[in-house]
């Protein structure tokens, strides 16, 4: 099995409930096992117009799915939860991004691994850091500690929302 990390985000239709439902869906994902969940963070929306704040988290999975099969499964979960892909970086019920897939790097038209904006987004980097050892090296990006040092996380706030207890830090 391969270890994969997935980012979760929502800022529409009860974001806390959206994250809980997404984690439940990920727990039932074929040929996969959810092993860890990060804390939940509140972040200011990045994108066009005024948008509500996001709730963000990350999860770690052990999976036998290929990267593209996992991406397809994530997009099916998004669709079931009402995700519409009309506006880039617009508000959304659920956003699931495949961040890491083992130590692999991929550059495909549909999928880049590691996710190309991990190092630029506190709302992705900090939940991911909850899952990984501090001395972890992210493929093609360098040490996690260096990435965190470059991103102070000033716009993030830890939220008092527990994802399923058996997987949370």
Image (cartoon, rainbow, N blue to C red):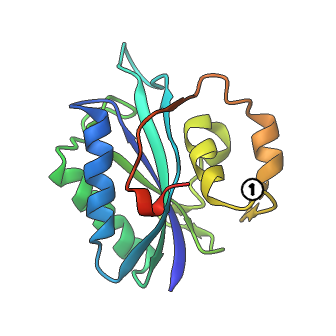
The residue lying toward the viewer, choosing from 26 and 46, is 26
Residue at the image point whose x is 45% and y is 73% from the top: 67
The answer to which image quadrant residue 165 occupies is bottom left
Residue 140 visible in the snapshot: yes
Residue named by callout 1:
141
Residue 19 located left or right of residue 151? left
Mark 1 residue element: loop
Residue at the image point whose x is 73% and y is 34% from the top: 151
Residue with the most extreme top position: 50
Residue 40 located left or right of residue 121? left
Residue 94 visible in the snapshot: no
Can you say which quadrant of the picture contains the C terminus? bottom right
The answer to which image quadrant residue 70 occupies is bottom left
Residue at the image point whose x is 29% and y is 53% from the top: 22
Residue at the image point whose x is 24% and y is 32% from the top: 14
Vertical order, 10 against 70 (above or below) = above
Q: Position of residue 61 (x, y in %)?
A: 47, 70
Q: Position of residue 68 (x, y in %)?
A: 39, 72
């Amino acid at each position: 099995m391969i270890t994969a990390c997935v980012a979760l985000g929502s800022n529409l239709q009860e974001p806390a409930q959206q994250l809980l439902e997404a984690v439940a869906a990920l727990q039932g994902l074929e040929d996969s096992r959810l092993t860890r969940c990060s804390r939940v963070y509140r972040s200011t929306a990045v994108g066009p117009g005024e948008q509500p704040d996001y709730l963000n988290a990350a999860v770690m999975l052990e999976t036998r799915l290929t990267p593209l099969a996992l991406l397809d499964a994530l997009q099916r979960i998004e669709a079931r939860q009402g995700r519409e892909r009309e506006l880039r970086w617009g508000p959304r019920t659920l956003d699931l991004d495949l961040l890491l897939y083992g130590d692999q790097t991929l550059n495909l038209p549909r999928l880049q691994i590691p996710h190309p904006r991990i190092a630029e987004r506190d709302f992705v980097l900090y939940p991911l850091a909850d899952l990984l050892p501090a001395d972890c090296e992210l493929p093609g990006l360098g040490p996690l500690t260096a990435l965190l040092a470059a991103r102070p996380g000033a716009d993030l706030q830890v939220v008092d929302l527990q994802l399923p207890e058996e997987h949370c830090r």
